[in-house]
Image: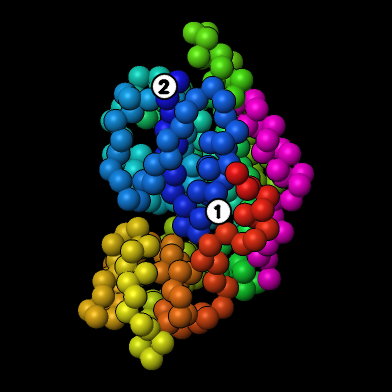
Amino acid sequence: MKGIICYYSGSGNTLLACQYLKSKIKNVDFELYDIVKNKVPDFSKYDVVGFATFADFGDIPQYFCSFFDKIPPQSNKNAFVFNTCGFLSGRTLQGFADKAKTNGFNVLSGYSLHTPESYPPMRNRRMPFDNSPKPKDIKKFNDFISRLDILLGTIKAGQTPENEKIKIGFLNSLLPKMPRTKAKEDMGKQKTDENLCIACGTCEKVCPSGAVHLKPKPVFSHDICCGCWACYNHCPKQAIHTEKYKGTGQYPHPNDNVKQRLKV
């Protein structure tokens, strides 16, 4: 069978987890699809669809919601949902599943994997979770992948699978959804230290909203910025800053621990 995993990864943690999952699944040949760089794919070409993202304030990132809004209604297309999280996943997984179901997908299963925190304010509050995922997390992740592969094998055999119930856990259920505007409030307006900036264009390339342009140094369109911190996290010279944060809490790519634990 042929499958596609549509992913949104800011720091690379989610992409790494998707590559790991892809390598473990035997019943489906998955293609990884970056929703930031591509348009909505033609899902009729695939037998199963995966959706993967990071938890954003206990919910689905704004960018992924916009992606779902562009997807044509599906007719019970088999799918699964998956997210990474630093502090807590909150209601991300449940919201993810509900969003997919609303679009007409048959959600087989879902899982949240604990990974290092990529949100600079949380890292500055000494909650980086850089040792995640721990061995017990990897074991649970492998168990999920095995169960998912069995479900996919059932579909491959022409049978109807028994979908797993999406569970988010007690602590995650207690975490309230926070307004997405809080991310921009936490961040404040971006500025550029022109003495440090080398006009490399990294910030412009990684911004999913198209809110950064080089002229020749970065200029920010604050009205369309979603406060995802990609420009701040990925600046190689720490030239992008705000009134609250400068040169601290960056997480531009998966650390050595997560790369080792999710090694393909």
Start-end of magenta stretch: 126-148
- Residue 134 drawn in magenta: yes
Which residue is more in the foreground, 42 or 173? 42
Q: Give the residue at mark 2.
A: 47
Amino acid type at mark 1 = Asn
| Corner quadrant of residue 4 | top left
- Which dot marks residue 13? 1
Locate residue 192, reporting x and y percent: 37, 83
The answer to whether 8 is drawn above or below residue 224 in the figure is: above
Rendered image quadrant of residue 221:
bottom left
What secondary structure is the stretch in magenta mostly built from?
helix
Q: Nearer the viewer, residue 1 or 119?
A: 1
Residue 174 shows in the view:
no
Name the quadrant of the N terminus.
top left
The front one of 47 and 173 is: 47
Please, what secondary structure does the residue beneath circle 1 have?
helix
User: Which residue is nearer to you in this view: 217 or 182?
Assistant: 217
Q: Is residue 109 left or right of residue 243?
A: right
Outermost residue, right side: 136
At which x and y percent is residue 62? Answer: 40, 51
Residue 15 visible in the snapshot: yes
